[in-house]
């Protein structure tokens, strides 16, 4: 349960037809890494959610993971301390650009808004660490999901899906955040459904890897079921 709570929200990765999601913890890791490249900034609380939470969500193309956010534009909300040696509006502009580029180009998140709030000033060295807010995803971002055991019997749909997913370039391993690394529901219409959890290397955009995992799993499992991918980790 602690691991499930620690991943934060399950964020839509790409449009509905991509059938993929990303944990907020994975997004947090990549976004914070991008912020480290912006001089004179110490990032504090960071959250990612829907930009228009009250808007009617589009119909999902595949069954979403339990508790996942629907597809739609996303907003990044972040607090930061800034160095007084540089104009704060310029620092905020560079930070906003870095976060937006990382979300879109490294991950594939449809980020349309980045809301920033300055919470304090750094010393002359331009270094510091803003305190994390209670419950922030970064409280547990170093807690990695354990490597998953090979799912299913040899030749089973679970084993076929696992083999296909791990063969995709950029996939490091299967993970077990929501339960089994491969969840197969042969009763889901019209041809069954498979959900796969993966950790990816970060050398390729997470959305591109997820797309290839979906295609590979659909081809590998008899009947070509619908496929949902959940990316739980993105490594450097």
Image: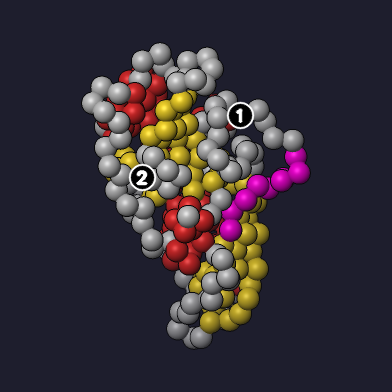
Density class for disc 2 (Cα within 10 Å; few <14, some 14-19, many ≥20) is many
Magenta residues span: 47-55
Which of the 4 image quarters holds residue 199?
top left
User: Along the horizontal axis of the image, is 105 left or right of 116?
Assistant: left
Magenta stretch contains residue 227: no
- The residue under the point 58% across, 43% down is 67
The percent coordinates of residue 192 (x first, y second) are 47, 20
Which of the 4 image quarters holds residue 133?
bottom right
- Disc nearer the start of the sequence (2/1): 1
- The residue under the point 37% across, 30% down is 213
Secondary structure under the numbered disc 2 in the rendered image: loop
Residue pointed to by mark 2 = 175
Secondary structure under the numbered disc 1 in the rendered image: loop
Which of the 4 image quarters holds residue 72?
top right
**Which residue, as the protein is rendered here, is positioned at the far bottom?**
124
**Which residue, as the protein is rendered here, is positioned at the far left?**
154
- Label 2 with label 1: CB-CB less than 8 Å: no
Q: Nearer the viewer, residue 160 or 87?
A: 160
- All told, the count of numbered labels is 2
Q: Is residue 159 above or below residue 65?
A: above
User: Along the horizontal axis of the image, is 108 left or right of 146?
Assistant: right
Quick check: can you spot residue 199? Answer: yes
Name the mark nearer the viewer: 2 or 1: 2
Residue pointed to by mark 1 = 60
The percent coordinates of residue 205 (x first, y second) are 41, 41
Q: Quadrant of the C terminus?
A: bottom left
The percent coordinates of residue 55 (x first, y second) are 75, 39
Between the residue at mark 2 and the residue at mark 1, the CA separation in whole angstroms equals: 23 Å
Q: In the drawing, what numbered circle is on residue 41? A: none
């Amino acid at each position: 349960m602690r691991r499930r709570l620690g991943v934060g929200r399950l964020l839509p990765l790409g449009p509905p037809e991509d059938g993929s999601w990303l944990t907020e913890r994975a997004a947090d890791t990549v976004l914070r890494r991008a912020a480290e490249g912006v001089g004179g900034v110490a990032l504090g609380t960071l959250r990612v959610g829907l930009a228009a939470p009250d808007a009617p969500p589009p119909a999902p193309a595949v069954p979403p993971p339990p508790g996942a956010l629907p597809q739609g534009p996303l907003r990044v909300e972040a607090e930061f301390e800034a160095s007084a040696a540089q104009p704060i509006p310029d620092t905020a502009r560079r930070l906003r650009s870095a976060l937006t580029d990382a979300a879109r180009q490294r991950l594939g998140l449809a980020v349309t808004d980045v809301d920033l709030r300055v919470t304090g000033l750094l010393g002359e060295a331009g270094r510091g660490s803003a305190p994390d807010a209670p419950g922030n995803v970064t409280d547990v971002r170093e807690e990695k999901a354990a490597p998953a055991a090979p799912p299913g019997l040899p030749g089973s749909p679970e084993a076929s899906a696992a083999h296909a997913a791990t063969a995709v370039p950029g996939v490091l391993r299967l993970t077990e955040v929501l339960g089994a690394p491969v969840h197969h529901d042969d009763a889901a219409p019209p041809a069954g459904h498979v959900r796969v959890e993966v950790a990816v290397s970060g050398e390729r955009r997470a959305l591109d890897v997820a797309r290839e995992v979906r295609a590979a799993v659909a081809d590998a499992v008899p009947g070509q079921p619908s496929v949902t991918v959940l990316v739980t980790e993105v490594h450097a």
